[in-house]
Amino acid sequence: MIRVLIADDQSMVRMGFRMILDAQDDIEVVADVEDGVAAVTKARELRPDVCLLDIRMPGLDGLEVTRQLAGPDVADPLKVVVVTTFDLDEYVHTALRNGASGFLLKDAGPALLIEAIRAAHRGDALVSPQVTVRLLKHFEGASARRSVEPPKEPLTARELDVVKAAARGLTNTEIGAELYMSLSTVKTHLAAVQGKVGARNRVEVAAWAWRSGLVD
């Protein structure tokens, strides 16, 4: 059972998300709160598997809550999926920098919301298709490419193929179909690349690929 905390300042949104998620056999909403301070407090108390956060909330916004719960300085980070109405690149960049495992627009639909929760729980990441490639193309811009860290170990040819496909926004299933690999092999390659480039999820792997100039 995937335990989920919902944080959104609109009660109708919280109610809608709860109805969608509680209807799934493998998901349970353990709490819903209306502001960022309560989100941090409740998340640290309950340790849910996934936190579903709005960005614009009173007290602390969802980006700061993400940093406090999943940021690079957090010893035992939680999984966070950010859901927002606002399709702004700076929000996406900041959410992912702060450790989010997913970024969805509120009009993405129930199916994508559920898949984002499941993806975060299994250590994967999901970003709304509307923003994925645009985000990766512009992730930190040209200056980031100049300062990108080299991998700890050289990537194999197949790992490079997988990374390039992920950077184009393909899902693991689509990568497997394109490269004639099983789903488990794709996941194995991505996990190996994460270790080599110091990434926490596939989104950071893809961002590293763009910054490194592997994809143009």
Image (tube, grey):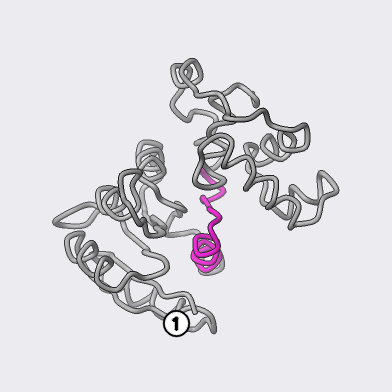
Mark 1 burial class by Cα count in 10 Å: few <14, some 14-19, many 20+: some
- Residue in the picture at 48% in, 78% down: 27
What is the x, y in percent for residue 194?
57, 42
For residue 135, above or below residue 171: above
Q: Position of 65 compared to 215: left or right?
A: left
Identity of the amino acid at label 1? Asp
- Residue in the picture at 46% in, 77% down: 20
What is the x, y in percent for residue 164?
68, 34
- Residue in the picture at 39% in, 72% down: 4
Give the image quarter of residue 105: bottom left
Q: Main secondary structure of the magenta part?
A: helix
Q: Position of 165 compared to 4: left or right?
A: right
Q: Position of 80 compared to 211: left or right?
A: left
In what quadrant of the picture does the C terminus appear? top right
Residue range in magenta is 112-131
Nearer to the camera, 198 or 205: 198
> Could you tell me if residue 163 is visible in this image?
yes
Furthest residue to the right? 180
Furthest residue to the front? 153
For residue 56, above or below residue 19: above
Furthest residue to the left? 59
What is the x, y in percent for residue 25?
54, 84
Numbered disc 1: secondary structure: helix
Nearer to the camera, 7 or 144: 144
Residue 102 part of the magenta segment: no
What is the x, y in percent for residue 10?
25, 67
> Could you tell me if residue 13 is visible in this image?
no
For residue 136, above or below residue 117: above
- Residue in the picture at 70% in, 45% down: 189
The residue that disc 1 covers is 22
Residue 123 part of the magenta segment: yes
